[in-house]
Amino acid sequence: MPAIRMTGPLEPRSGWEASGCTIAKSLDLLSTKSAFLLLREAFYGATRFDDLSARAGVSEPVAAARLKELVERGLLERHEYREPGQRARPGYGLTRKGAELLPVLVALMQWGDRWATDDGGPVELRHRDCGSRVHVELRCDYDHEVDLDELDLAPHHARRPTSRRGGAANARRTR
């Protein structure tokens, strides 16, 4: 069965613990299904509390609690809006930190389309410029597509390698 290979001080696997795991920390930030669904609706353009709550299919008290958490965790920002003749109401928008979760949600959607439905799911994402379907994939800094059995788990180094991706992508565009 394919698996990520442990390297360096992480090998053997029994010799270390996944303390400080950023997957666990990320799940702590998102915490609930309702948080994911509210973020989904924010990506789909909902900004008003009542729209977010209704479209995510959660009660107003649950939406209020989750939205407060998402704002406190820096994934959404809260702002006020006012319809003419109405009182001010809360509105919400994605922060950069929140917007960078898009590949995570698209990966969940892509997985669900393949494994959680019989018909490929109710919607799909398409690239506005060319109309082709959008998908998430793993790529290295040199723009190679990477499969599970090609991955090594290594200790994090403070200095990260320089990305070659921009150069490779630019080279493809100019050909």
Image: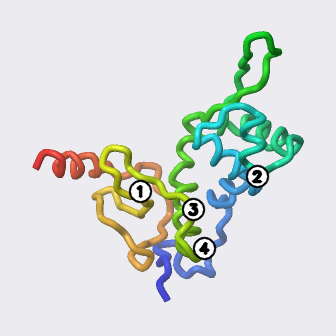
Give the percent coordinates (x, y) of residue 43.
Answer: 58, 43
Decide which of 79, 133 is in the foreground and name it.
Answer: 133
Amino acid carrying mark 3 in the image = Pro
State the separation of the CA atoms marked 1 and 4.
18 Å
Amino acid carrying mark 1 in the image = Val
State the separation of the CA atoms marked 3 and 1.
15 Å
Could you tell which of marks 4 and 2 lies nearer the N-terminus?
2
Give the percent coordinates (x, y) of residue 159.
Answer: 41, 49
SS for dot 3: loop
Q: Which residue is farthest top?
A: 85
Left or right: where 97 falls relative to 81: left
Is mark 3 in CB contact (under 8 Å) with mark 4? Answer: no
Could you tell which of marks 3 and 4 lies nearer the N-terminus?
4
Residue highlighted by disc 4:
117
Residue highlighted by disc 2:
34
Could you tell which of marks 1 and 4 lies nearer the N-terminus?
4
SS for dot 4: loop
Q: Which residue is farthest left?
A: 175
SS for dot 2: helix
Q: Residues within 10 Å of mark 3 (few under 14, many from 20)?
A: few
State the separation of the CA atoms marked 3 and 4.
9 Å
Could you tell which of marks 2 and 3 lies nearer the N-terminus?
2
1 vs 4, front mark: 4
Q: Is residue 38 above or below residue 21?
A: above
Left or right: where 115 falls relative to 153: right
Decide which of 27, 154 is in the foreground and name it.
Answer: 27
State the separation of the CA atoms marked 2 and 3.
19 Å
Give the percent coordinates (x, y) of residue 131.
Answer: 34, 51
Residue highlighted by disc 3:
122
2 vs 3, front mark: 3
Could you tell which of marks 3 and 1 lies nearer the N-terminus?
3
Amino acid carrying mark 4 in the image = Thr
